[in-house]
């Protein structure tokens, strides 16, 4: 710190000396206002050019050591001629030498002050910021330039006042400037070494690699409330296989109630042992015991003579064929493989699920390929996942590649990722690399994150592929920043928020890739420093990038993370990647263009929503094309946009639409569907209820949310309901089955706590 404060004090002294010398020059005394104005304008112009460093490759590529030494070196180069000319002038008294000395002094002042305030002082602030983190120095580093400027003004005022009162000649002080410059260079070299040591200490202070596994813990701690009900699906194979330790020793009333509810809905005879345990005592309450005993009696009565007792199925809504298929669970002997294959081949989804569960209960490993194929279908994915997890990675590890297809949705890919997490890294690595190379950005991010947590270090071709993926992601982020800035400029706040989410996901993927390339310690320093959105943090991040990365990725990384505001980020990124001009074009049409595939469904829906609000900004071909989308959300929002721009466009395309979508789209175009019944409004509503979950993810839950303009005020068990405003001053009702929340949490387990807190705070299943 002594070197730091000495250098800062010497900077102040040098600046004050420079100002004093300038005010004693003949040029200043002759025309003080004009001379001062010329110096100020020249210095400000030079500073503005340097402020936008992307204009100057020298400044853009300069390392921290060069930034510390820039102003002292410029002072030394220009003050030495000024001092030598002044000595000659003092010896022979030629006026031309005085003017030449004044010229060199003026140039030294302009360049020194511009470099000092734009480059050196911010670098000193960065150095202090690093010292503060590493050594615990308590200083406000970002106020350093302001405090230094205040000290310069105060000392200059004092020194100029003394010179005015005493009348001494200050022009000879120009001889001190080269000496000051040499001292500043020496101190700068010392500080550069300190900076490197501090940066190394900061990187070394980051904890080592933590090995991570998706494998569930063997001894699961008991939980309570809504979280307990979510465990039932996870434990289902254990429950139907007679492994009832958790139910007997740890489960609470919510867990037992969910078991009973599952039995009522599925009529599964394999749950009879669990139901008998619940009914055998009052541990879960007398009411629940009676309810369990009642369903036991009904199930046993039905399966004792299915033909005579078929009327018992009416209340549950289960077909005779489905119930008959579930009788396979009653076999005391292990069923033949062909019996289970017959269930798996059935077109009825419930029967197919029964076959999958039967394969898991009886450990029919011969059917592991059939179960693996079931993972890729939304109707059977959950059951197949639990069975494969029960089989273990030793059974499915060699066939999991058959489930990885380009057409598989994000949800199913996330399940496959979870299965890969249970496998040894060496076996899962080829599949994880396939996920990283392409596909949905969230899946790519999770694959890269898993490799990071396992401490994987890529080499050779793998490293090159990861560098390519990183460059591609940086280009994507640059385009998202351009779109986001334009959306904010147009006050499209919903669209800007959607782009911000896209950007966060890409940032997460980028940082995971960066961790793979440079190691966790260095990546953590870059992430934490660039994330504080200060000039000091950005400078530390840029220097760390220069230290630990190769030239091929350091330039775009520094452009993104070495700036602390989006305008400068985008300006510098434009030098690294080709970015199309957005100004003057509709940002919504730019997002919806077919060649732009960097945004998800929700962002495109927000763009269409903006077009519908403006009544313009999209041509006919593009608007109509979204009517044929596989996404119901995009169909509805494009219908909204067509309704406000030109309803006749729909008439031209109506005959070409699939029958299943035509009626719904026509109702939206005609305005017969309330806005509250559309997926866009449902997703926004749910994101407000369950704060912290992005709308992109809420689309899965929004598709299960039902809207009604007429409603009963009474609560329905297993249903969450909200009274919401509707059109024409009326009220409507949103209703959401709790089962669908459990399905959502299964796919996106990272949001479990949000739903658990919400449900536990309500106390019941109905909300108004």
Image (cartoon, grey):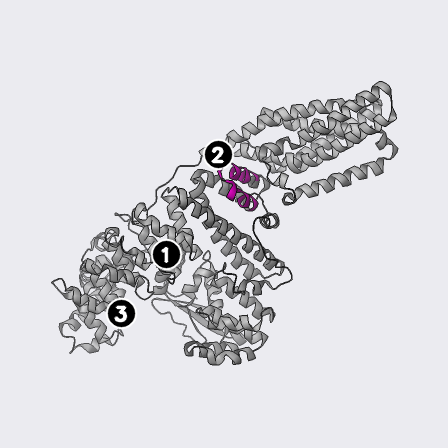
- Label 3 to label 2: alpha-carbon separation: 57 Å
State the extent of the magenta-drawn residues as a range. 539-559
Residue 232: percent from left, percent from top:
28, 59
Residue at mark 2: 202
Q: Secondary structure at mark 3?
A: helix
Looking at the image, is mark 1 or mark 2 earlier in the sequence? 2
Q: Residue at x 78, y 28 (%)?
A: 20
Q: Residue at x 65, y 62 (%)?
A: 584
Task: Give the crowd class for mark 1: few <14, some 14-19, many >=20 residues within 10 Å.
Answer: some
Question: Quick one: 633 or 161, which is closer to the camera?
Answer: 633
Question: Quick one: 124 or 87, which is closer to the camera?
Answer: 87
Residue at mark 3: 350
- Label 1 to label 3: alpha-carbon separation: 23 Å
Residue at mark 1: 414
Q: Is residue 23 visible?
A: no
Check whether the beta carbons of the residues at disc 3 and disc 2 lie within 8 A of each other.
no
Count of residue discs: 3
Q: Residue at x 40, y 49 (%)?
A: 448
Looking at the image, is mark 1 or mark 3 earlier in the sequence? 3
Q: Is residue 89 above or below residue 217?
A: above
Task: Give the crowd class for mark 2: few <14, some 14-19, many >=20 residues within 10 Å.
Answer: some
Based on the displayed image, in which of its 4 quarters is residue 30 positioned? top right
Q: Quadrant of the C terminus?
A: bottom left
Residue 562: percent from left, percent from top:
56, 43
617 on left or right of 159: left
Assess whether residue 486 is covered by the magenta stretch.
no
Q: Is residue 398 above or below residue 656?
A: above
């Amino acid at each position: 710190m002594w070197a730091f404060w000495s250098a800062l004090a010497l900077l102040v002294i040098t600046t004050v000396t420079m100002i004093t010398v300038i005010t004693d020059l003949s040029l200043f005394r002759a025309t003080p206002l004009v001379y001062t104005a010329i110096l100020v304008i020249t210095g400000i112009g030079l500073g503005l050019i340097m402020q936008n460093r992307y204009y100057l490759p020298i400044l853009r590529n300069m390392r921290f050591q060069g930034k510390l030494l820039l102003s002292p070196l410029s002072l030394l180069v220009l003050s030495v001629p000024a001092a030598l000319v002044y000595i000659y002038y003092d010896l022979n008294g030629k006026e031309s030498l005085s003017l030449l000395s004044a010229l060199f002094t003026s140039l030294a002042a302009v360049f020194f002050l511009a470099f000092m305030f734009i480059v050196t002082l911010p670098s000193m602030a960065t150095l202090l910021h690093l010292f503060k983190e590493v050594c615990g120095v308590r200083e406000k580093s970002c106020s350093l330039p302001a405090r230094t400027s205040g000290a310069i003004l105060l000392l200059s005022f004092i020194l100029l006042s003394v010179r005015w009162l005493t009348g001494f000649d200050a022009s000879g002080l120009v001889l001190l400037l080269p000496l000051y410059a040499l001292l500043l260079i020496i101190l700068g070299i010392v500080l550069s070494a300190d900076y490197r040591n501090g940066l190394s200490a900061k990187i070394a202070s980051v904890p080592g690699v933590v090995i991570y596994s998706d494998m569930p813990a063997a001894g699961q701690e008991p939980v309570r409330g809504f979280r307990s009900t979510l465990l039932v699906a996870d434990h289902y194979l254990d429950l139907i296989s007679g492994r009832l330790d958790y139910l007997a020793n740890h489960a609470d009333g919510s867990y037992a109630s969910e078991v009973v509810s599952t039995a009522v809905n599925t009529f599964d005879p394999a749950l009879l042992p669990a139901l008998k345990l619940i009914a055998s005592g009052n541990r879960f309450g007398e009411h629940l015991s009676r309810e369990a005993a009642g369903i036991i009696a009904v199930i046993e009565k039905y399966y004792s003579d299915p033909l005579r007792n078929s009327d018992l199925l009416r209340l549950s809504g289960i077909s005779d064929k489905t119930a008959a298929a579930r009788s396979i669970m009653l076999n005391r002997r292990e069923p033949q493989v062909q019996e289970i294959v017959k269930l798996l081949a059935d077109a009825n989804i419930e029967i197919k699920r029964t076959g999958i569960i039967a394969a898991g209960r009886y450990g029919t490993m011969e059917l592991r390929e059939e179960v693996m194929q079931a993972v890729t279908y939304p109707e059977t994915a959950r059951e197949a996942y639990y069975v494969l997890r029960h089989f273990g990675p030793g059974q499915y590890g060699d066939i999991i590649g058959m489930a990885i297809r380009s057409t598989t949705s994000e949800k199913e890919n996330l399940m496959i990722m979870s299965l890969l997490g249970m496998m040894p890294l060496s076996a899962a690595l080829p599949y994880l690399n396939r996920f990283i190379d392409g596909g949905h950005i969230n899946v790519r991010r999770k694959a890269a994150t898993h490799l990071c947590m396992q401490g994987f270090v890529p080499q050779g071709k793998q490293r090159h592929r990861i560098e390519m993926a990183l460059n591609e992601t940086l280009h994507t982020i640059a385009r998202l920043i351009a779109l986001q800035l334009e959306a904010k400029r147009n006050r499209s706040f919903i669209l800007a928020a959607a782009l911000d989410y896209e950007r966060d996901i890409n940032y997460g993927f980028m940082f995971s890739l960066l961790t793979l390339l440079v190691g966790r310690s260095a990546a953590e320093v870059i992430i934490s420093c660039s994330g504080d959105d200060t000039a000091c943090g950005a400078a530390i991040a840029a220097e760390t990038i220069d230290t630990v990365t190769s030239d091929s990725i350091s330039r775009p990384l520094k452009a993104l993370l070495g700036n602390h505001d989006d305008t400068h980020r985008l300006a510098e990124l434009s030098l690294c990647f080709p970015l199309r001009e957005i100004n003057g074009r509709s940002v919504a049409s730019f997002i919806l263009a077919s060649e732009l595939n960097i945004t998800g469904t929700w962002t495109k829906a927000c763009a269409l929503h903006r077009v519908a609000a403006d009544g313009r900004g999209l041509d006919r071909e593009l608007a109509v094309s979204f009517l044929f989308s596989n996404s119901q959300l995009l169909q509805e929002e494009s219908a909204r946009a067509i309704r406000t721009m030109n309803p006749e466009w729909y008439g031209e395309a109506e005959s070409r639409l699939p029958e299943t979508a035509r009626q719904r789209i026509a109702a939206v175009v005609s305005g017969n569907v309330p806005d509250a019944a559309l997926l866009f409004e449902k997703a926004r509503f749910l994101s407000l209820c369950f704060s912290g979950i992005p709308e992109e993810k809420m689309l899965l839950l929004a598709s299960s949310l039902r809207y009604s303009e007429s409603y009963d005020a009474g609560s329905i068990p297993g249903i969450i309901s909200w009274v919401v405003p509707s059109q024409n001053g009326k009220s409507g009702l949103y209703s959401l089955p709790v089962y669908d929340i459990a399905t959502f949490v299964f796919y996106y387990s990272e949001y479990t706590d949000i739903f658990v807190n919400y449900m536990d705070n309500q106390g019941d299943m109905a909300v108004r």
